[in-house]
Image: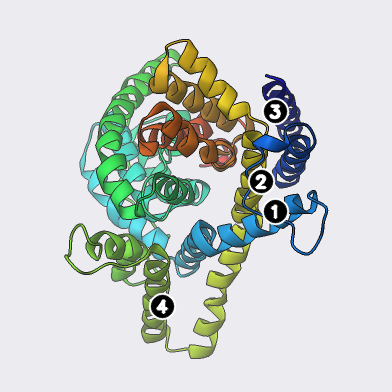
């Protein structure tokens, strides 16, 4: 009980600091070290960290040794996947392949004359695009440039169009998404298997429901604001963005996802590839296309540095957060807080389903408050496997709703980067 109370107090303090714009990595790291220290001092029998003091008789050094090992382990596994995905996404933006892909996917929507139907279907297309373009903000900005003008010219209000675009990453789907990779790892399965067997069946139903809600709510609020859906005369205007690159560039962002899905043991017997390999192959293929198209090796090679810069940015922003969140999670567990919660819920007769709901709501609330689905999910996903085992349920049954709600919470957060960017850019768009 004491360990649970201490853990909750430390968690609340950490949450308030993050809400007040304190650096989340530092806050989570310090909170984790505090909880591990409390565990070593007051609950030594509950500390089960694998790290042991090396050549030093002071057990407290195990905390910092564990921190180093946590960082190394995260970089070597899911961290490298996230970094490769970030580098690939930045390179696709650099060569304007992402723009070309967006243009290709939204072109059929222009054939539909019902503006709010286009708006609803546009969400589904955008959500599918998110599988290849993992950055929620990056996808939104691309759609603002390409799809937003189409919606406005079809008669949809700017507010409705911007709101829909902000929802296109409502769920983080696909093998290239950081939270999905971590969820797959925590569930003990390959990213492609997690995506196909678990994410897709849920995502299909959610996308249909969200699209229907977008259709009716957009119409309702447009009518409430006195907006009349009248198409403008230049609806058929071609988008300039992305026209400067060959049409086949639109296929490049989908290369990693295609490789992972096709060359995996569940589809092609005896053949499999890794997400990192798929990202590198996709980037190298894009490099070859750039060389053949531009015939300027010096500038093309210089441009490929964008891939490595993108990896560095993901390490600084996401992988470091993952490592620090892992330290916090271990500290939370070491105090006995998880065991206390499991025992308490079990004693109430609620079982694993109730605990799954509690954990999912906790992740969703954190994502809404902080504006980051990554922060919410990374901070608590490490608790799920042990909790699920304690209740006798599969880890994926608890992790899947947590991972999907993390993206949903971000889309509902007024402080999320994608929502801020869309609201500001949408209001300023002509």
Q: Are marks 2 and 3 in contact (CB under 8 Å)?
A: no
The answer to which of marks 3 and 4 sits earlier in the sequence is 3
**Residue pictured at 36% horizontal, 79% vertical:** 289
Q: Which residue is mark 4?
A: 284
Closer mark to the observer between disc 1 and disc 4? 1
Dot 1 or dot 3: first in sequence order is 3
Name the residue beneath numbered marker 1: 67
Q: Earlier in the sequence, mark 2 or mark 1?
A: 1
52 or 185: nearer the viewer: 52
Can you tell which mark lies on residue 327? 2
The residue closer to the viewer here, 184 or 332, is 332
Foreground disc of the pair 4, 2 = 2
Q: Are marks 2 and 1 in contact (CB under 8 Å)?
A: yes
Which residue is at 35% across, 64% downward? 256
In the rendered image, residue 4, in percent from the top left (x then y), is placed at: 67, 23
* Mark positioned earlier in the residue sequence (2 or 3): 3
- Crowd band around label 1 with a 10 angstrom C-alpha radius: few (<14), some (14–19), many (20+): many
* Numbered badge on residue 7: 3
**In this picture, residue 127 sits left or right of residue 62:** left
Q: Mark 1 touching mark 4, by CB under 8 A?
A: no
- At x 37%, y 71%, the residue is 282
The answer to which of marks 1 and 4 sits earlier in the sequence is 1
Sequence-wise, the earlier of marks 4 and 2 is 4
- Nearer the observer, disc 3 or disc 4? 3
Secondary structure of the residue carrying tag 3 is helix
Give the Cα separation between the discs numbered 1 and 4: 34 Å
């Amino acid at each position: 009980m004491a360990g649970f109370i201490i853990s909750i107090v430390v968690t609340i303090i950490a949450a308030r600091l993050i809400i007040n714009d304190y650096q989340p990595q530092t806050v989570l790291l310090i909170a984790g070290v505090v909880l591990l220290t409390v565990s070593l001092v007051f609950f030594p029998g509950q500390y089960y960290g694998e790290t042991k003091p090396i050549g030093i008789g002071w057990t407290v050094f195990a905390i910092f040794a564990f921190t180093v090992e946590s960082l190394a382990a995260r970089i070597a596994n899911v961290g490298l996947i996230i970094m490769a995905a970030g580098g690939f996404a930045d390179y696709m933006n650099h060569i304007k392949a992402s723009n070309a892909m967006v243009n290709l996917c939204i072109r059929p929507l222009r054939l539909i004359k019902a503006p709010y139907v286009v708006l609803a279907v546009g969400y589904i297309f955008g959500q599918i695009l998110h599988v290849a373009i993992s950055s929620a903000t990056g996808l939104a900005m691309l759609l603002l440039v390409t799809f937003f003008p189409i919606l406005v010219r079809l008669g949809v209000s700017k507010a409705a169009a911007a709101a829909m675009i902000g929802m296109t990453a409502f769920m983080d789907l696909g093998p290239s998404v950081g939270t999905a990779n971590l969820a797959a790892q925590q569930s003990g399965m390959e990213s492609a298997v997690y995506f196909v067997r678990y994410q897709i069946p849920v995502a299909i139903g959610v996308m249909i429901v969200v699209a229907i809600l977008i259709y009716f709510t957009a119409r309702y609020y447009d009518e409430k604001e006195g907006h009349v859906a009248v198409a403008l005369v230049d609806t058929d205007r071609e988008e300039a963005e992305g026209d400067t690159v060959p049409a086949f560039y639109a296929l490049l962002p989908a290369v990693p996802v295609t490789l992972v899905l096709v060359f995996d043991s569940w589809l092609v017997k005896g053949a499999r590839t890794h997400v990192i390999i798929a990202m590198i192959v996709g980037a190298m293929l894009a490099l070859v296309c750039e060389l053949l198209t531009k015939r300027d090796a010096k500038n093309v090679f210089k441009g490929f540095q964008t891939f490595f810069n993108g990896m560095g940015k993901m390490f600084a922003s996401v992988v470091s957060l993952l490592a620090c969140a892992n330290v916090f999670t271990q500290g939370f567990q070491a105090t006995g807080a998880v065991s206390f919660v499991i025992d308490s819920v079990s004693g109430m007769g609620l079982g694993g389903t109730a605990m799954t709901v509690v954990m999912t709501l906790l992740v969703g609330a954190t994502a809404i408050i902080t504006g980051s689905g990554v922060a919410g999910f990374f901070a608590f996903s490490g608790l799920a496997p042990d909790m699920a085992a304690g209740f006798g349920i599969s880890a994926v049954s608890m992790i899947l709703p947590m991972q999907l709600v993390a993206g949903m919470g971000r889309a509902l957060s007024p402080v999320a980067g994608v929502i801020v960017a869309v609201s500001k850019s949408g209001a300023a768009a002509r």
